[in-house]
Amino acid sequence: MLRKIIKIDKEKCNGCGICVDACHEGAIALINNKAELIHEHYCDGLGDCLPACPQNAISFEEREAPAYDEAAVKKAQAHKKTAFTCPGSAVKTFTPRANTPQNTMSSISQLQQWPVQIKLVPVSAPYFDNANLLIAADCTAFSYAAFHDEFIKNHITLIGCPKLDEGDYTEKLTAILKSNNIKSLSIVRMEVPCCGGLENAAKNALQQSGKFIPWQITVISTDGKIISD
């Protein structure tokens, strides 16, 4: 079928591997130190890998390619290792965490700034300089018991609820990313469908900012467990 799919310029590719982590479908791999689209039917054509490439080696093209196979992607993801490293970045290896026993959790708040609501936070502030930015759905801190110690700690935190707040967060988040030196971006959302709005806004903002920042997504279940990264 004729559809939109990514194209990788191997002459521009430096083999950093950032796009491999950015592609949550697992369509890209490093072959002989060059990024390569190894599973065309895994590529959904959304281009999450584009803003991750520091060499601008990835673009879109429209050509004959197998249809996107969501079932095959989910099957492959079920067997994927849950720990990963953002190549070329200072972000440490991320491993999903087991629920922390309540008697071992710190009772000290790890919040570093105020306000925290996306709608209220200023576009520019000193605490954004060289910051690890956390964008989280409101409910995540209530669902995951160790949220402060495992997500907020050492991060500047922004929260929102796309179902309750009016409008889209993309413009505000894009302005924040453009105006500040952000080191990394972590997105934490609930498994419920409405949280997809927060994830999409953060991903669109990263793409529109034109910056190449290591990023990751964590999904929390309604019973307070990490279910995917």
Image (cartoon, rainbow, N blue to C red):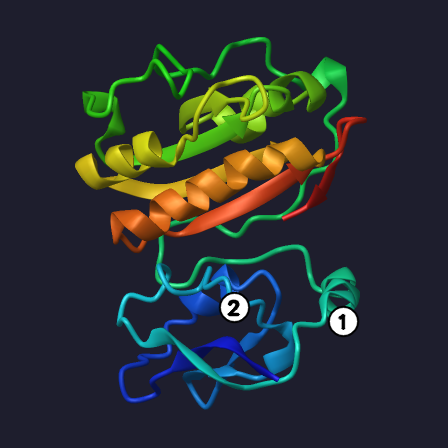
As drawn, 8 above or below 202 = below
The crowd level at tag 2 (other Cα within 10 Å; few <14, some 14-19, many 20+) is some
Decide if residue 163 is in sight here: yes
The residue wearing badge 1 is 72
User: Does the rendering let one see residue 39?
Assistant: no
Residue that badge 2 annotates: 45
Q: Is residue 40 above or below residue 42?
A: below
Residue at the spot 32% in from the left edge and 17% down from the top edge: 121
Categorize mark 1 by other alpha carbons within 10 Å: few (<14), some (14-19), many (20+): few
The residue sitting at the front extreme is: 2
Q: Quadrant of residue 169?
A: top left
- Does residue 148 appear to the left or right of 178 in the view shown? right
| x and y, in percent, of residue 55 in the image | 26, 72
Q: Is residue 84 above or below residue 39?
A: above
The residue closer to the viewer here, 109 or 194, is 194
Residue 54: x and y, percent? 28, 66
User: Dot 1: what SS?
Assistant: helix
Q: Secondary structure at mark 2?
A: loop
Residue 7: horizontal and vertical position, in percent?
41, 81
Q: Residue at x 66, y 72 (%)?
A: 68
Horizontal relation, residue 196 to residue 124: left or right: right
Type of amino acid at the residue the image marks with label 1: Ala
The answer to whether mark 2 and mark 1 are in CB contact below 8 A is: no
In the picture, the quarter occupied by the N terminus is: bottom right
Instruction: Indicate which disc, 2 or 1, sits on the residue closer to the N terminus.
Output: 2
Q: CA distance from mark 2 to mark 1?
A: 15 Å
Query: Could you tell me the amino acid type at mark 2?
Result: Gly
Question: In the rendered view, would you say 29 is above or below 207?
Answer: below
Quarter of the image where one finds residue 64: bottom right
Q: Residue at x 59, y 39 (%)?
A: 196
